[in-house]
Image: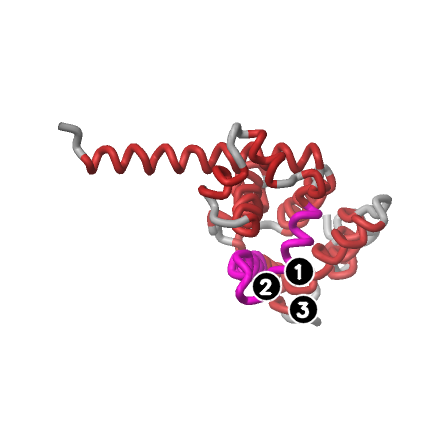
Amino acid sequence: MRDSGTGRRGSYAKGVAKREEILTRALDVIAREGYSGASIKELADAVGLSQAGLLHYFGSKEELFTEILRKRDELDSVDQGFAGDLQQGLAAETTSLPDIREGYLSVIRHNADVPGLVHLFARLSVDAADPGHPAHQFFVTRGESLRDFFATAIAAQQSSGAITDRVDADTLARIFQAVADGLQVQWMLEPEVDMAATVDALFDLLTPPAARPDEPGSAP
């Protein structure tokens, strides 16, 4: 006689594996077709399911899209150094300013290569302002985690004189998040906008001349 507990575990494992397949395929579809082309039918066809069968694994279109963004962050945490530090909770106070800067910019450059996902992120973030939206807690928690890591890193750099301390670290972390998110909207409207270069200029504004290695008279 079959062990019902073993059967349930096997069924659960298959369900988890199917969810992972759906999310991975969905990321490919959105990257290729864009947000507007990522209909439930398109996503269901990509994994050989009916639309009802697809939503069986997630409950609703909104929950599916939320999990797609969560999967994107998970993959980025492996591919991007800064995101990896953020996700794994490494000590931000020991991260050097060049690493923080390049890591943040690399994430922004990567986003420019996946406009469909940027569109999905921007669209869902507006809808998630409603506390009852399935993505609400995802965006709140994500923002808090990003700002906490970045504020700790900025505070450490302020202590060493690498970043100006005229504005407190928590406020600067929120400004960086606001600039990055706002630039994504501007970039969707004006694709010629260089998001990474704009954020890089913000780093320049916060870095005292003496702390810039390429500035005349700076420390060697």
Q: Which amino acid type is shown beneath numbered disc 3?
A: Asp
- Tell me the distance, in whole angstroms, between the alpha carbons under discs 1 and 3: 32 Å
Q: What span is in magenta? A: 118-147
Q: Mark 1 points at which residue?
A: 126
* Front disc: 1 or 3: 1
Disc 3 and disc 2: Cα gap in Å? 8 Å
The answer to whether mark 3 and mark 2 are in CB contact below 8 A is no
Mark 2 is surrounded, within 10 Å at the Cα level, by few (under 14), some (14 to 19) or many (20 or more) other residues, namely: many
Query: Where does the image place residue 74, in percent across and percent down from the top left?
Result: 52, 42
Give the residue displayed 62% in from the left and 34% down from the top.
42
| Residue 85 seen from this side | no
For label 1, the crowd category at 10 Å Cα-Cα, with few meaning under 14, some 14 to 19 and many 20 or more, is few
Q: In the rendering, which numbered label is found on residue 7?
A: none
Q: Earlier in the sequence, mark 2 or mark 1?
A: 1
Q: Is residue 6 above or below residue 85?
A: above
Label ID, residue 155: 2
Give the quarter of the figure containing the N terminus: top left
| Amino acid type, callout 2 | Ala
Q: Position of residue 205 (x, y in %)?
A: 78, 60
Indicate the secondary structure of the residue bearing disc 2.
Answer: helix
Residue 135 appears in the rendering: yes
Q: Earlier in the sequence, mark 3 or mark 2?
A: 2
Who's the residue at 22% across and 34% down the image?
6
Of the two numbered discs 1 and 3 on the same chain, state the one appearing first in sequence. 1
Secondary structure mainly formed by the magenta segment: helix
* Residue lying at 74% horizontally and 55% vertically, measured from the top left: 203
